[in-house]
Image (cartoon, rainbow, N blue to C red):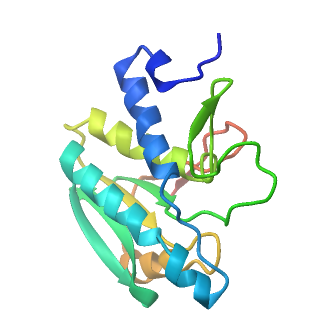
Amino acid sequence: MAIERLDQITNQKDRELVELLQNLVRIPSWVPQEPAEAKLTQNGNCVVDFLENWIKSNTTLSVERQKLDGDRFNLIASNGQPDLVFLGHTDTVPPSQGSPYGQLEAEIHDGKIWGRGTTDMKSGVASMIHALSLTPEAKNVWAMFYADEEYDFLGMKALVKDYSDLRPKLRFSFRPTGAILKSVRV
């Protein structure tokens, strides 16, 4: 039987992860193409606000914001030296035409969560922070969430500029890769 509602998920941790993803999907986070639209839809910082509050409430990580142009931010959560770094971006592409379900509703249909960013990248971000909340004893772990991946890489450029001296043993980005786990050894 395919799951259609959150209350059908019996495992508490699985339900928490799905609910976390749904909360992220419901936050509009695309970069507008038109200046007038920017005032209405530039909500990348709302994702950063949500992540910052969630991480502070549910993990033992320290959190800091990295200021970017245009009053935007990256978010860095850390514990010790970065032996393991998780990377994820906070923006999505704009909503498309013809979606069968509301793109900011995060509805469950046939066991799948539908919505803007469910594949790229909000499911990865939710998985990262949920995993970190389940391992409070983990040391030397960082999570870096960067803005503007879908457009000009503003956030990644700032991370490279300010954190290029970091030499983690492993970096993971939870991007959609056809269910193939990819890591970068440095």
Q: Nearer the viewer, residue 49 or 162?
A: 49
Q: Which residue is found at the position 63% from the left and 24% from the top?
A: 111
Q: Is residue 13 above or below residue 136?
A: above
On-image quarter of the N terminus: top right
Q: Nearer the viewer, residue 80 or 64?
A: 64
Percent from the top left, x then y, of residue 90? 49, 63
Q: Is residue 27 left or right of residue 118?
A: left
Total residue callouts: 0
Q: Which residue is found at the position 48% from the left and 57% from the top?
A: 27
Q: Which residue is found at the position 32% from the left and 41% from the top?
A: 132
Residue at the extreme right: 98
Q: Quadrant of residue 138?
A: top left
Residue at the extreme top: 1
Percent from the top left, x then y, of residue 140? 26, 51
Q: Nearer the viewer, residue 108 or 181?
A: 108
- Asked whether residue 101 appears in the rendered view, the answer is yes
Q: Is residue 59 left or right of residue 98?
A: left
Q: Which residue is found at the position 62% from the left and 53% from the top?
A: 116
- Asked whether residue 59 appears in the rendered view, the answer is no
Q: Is residue 38 left or right of residue 33?
A: left
Percent from the top left, x then y, of residue 42? 51, 75
